[in-house]
Image (cartoon, rainbow, N blue to C red):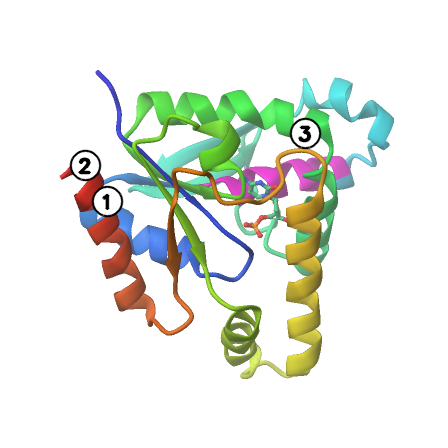
Amino acid sequence: MKTINIAIDGPAGAGKSTIAKMVSARLGYIYVDTGALYRAVALYITENNIADEDIEKALAGADVSLRFVDGAQRVFLGDRDVSDLIRTPAISMAASRTSAIPAVRAYLFETQQKIARENNIIMDGRDIGTVVLPNADVKIFLTASAEERANRRYKELAEKPDCPPYDEILQDIIKRDYADMHREISPLKQAEDAVLVDTTTLNLEESAEAIVKVIESKIG
Ligand code: DC
């Protein structure tokens, strides 16, 4: 049976994961956060001190997998659930760097395609509509202005004691956008047949609603 595949790509901080989770719950699809796979690989490389030239060989033994518990995604290295360990700033940085290594992308390519073949999914990432699932039923490019994304991140962090200044957050976002859009392999870009959803002036509910409308217009 053919499964339904919905690809959502866009820059860091556009709200992809929160919005994609809301839409998946509404449609009864599995939400797949591919950033978690890149983060788990980064954790593996960091913990095992693997040099760049040894990554391809080492990944053969990494055993990165996703499991779904009550519809929620957990990411595993072997039998170890690393879903929480991968959410540190150090692993964000490491994942940003190692995700540009061709052997890392090649390793995760089949993992992502297999999940999409076997399930009705909403998959978010940077290259899902362009590279991983070029035949996805629906492709969405979700974005918001850099200033608005920085603003949202600032509000999220404002409660915490070590909240960085707004300008620093904005500069980080601009830097990460640049790195994601200009890397040689699988750069972040809107697929030709993707629908652009700009959430700069939308709240979460309005953003989810906009995406559900796009999906309904494509697959009824
Ligand atoms: O979405 P995220 O911040 O959890 O992603 C972590 C890193 O992985 C990010 O720097 C970009 C990279 N990534 C990627 O290159 N391709 C994807 N499909 C998903 C994430």
- Judging by the rendered image, the residue that carries numbered circle 2 is 219
Quarter of the image that includes the N terminus: top left
Give the vertical position of 107 relative to 147 (above or below): above
Q: Earlier in the sequence, mark 1 or mark 3?
A: 3
User: Which labelled disc corresponds to residue 104?
Assistant: 3
Q: Residue at x 56, y 78 (%)?
A: 154
Give the vertical position of 144 relative to 40 (above or below): below
- Judging by the rendered image, the residue that carries numbered circle 1 is 215
Cβ atoms under marks 3 and 2 closer than 8 Å: no
Helix, strand or loop for disc 3: helix
Residue 111 picture location, percent across and down: 50, 24
Residue 71, picture quadrant: top left
Q: Is residue 46 left or right of residue 197?
A: right
Q: Earlier in the sequence, mark 3 or mark 2?
A: 3
> Which residue appears farthest toward the front when viewing the image?
192
Helix, strand or loop for disc 2: helix
Q: Residue at x 71, y 61 (%)?
A: 175
> Which residue appears farthest toward the left when viewing the image?
220
The kind of residue tagged 3 is: Val
The kind of residue tagged 2 is: Ile
Q: Is residue 43 magenta?
A: yes
Quarter of the image that includes the C terminus: top left
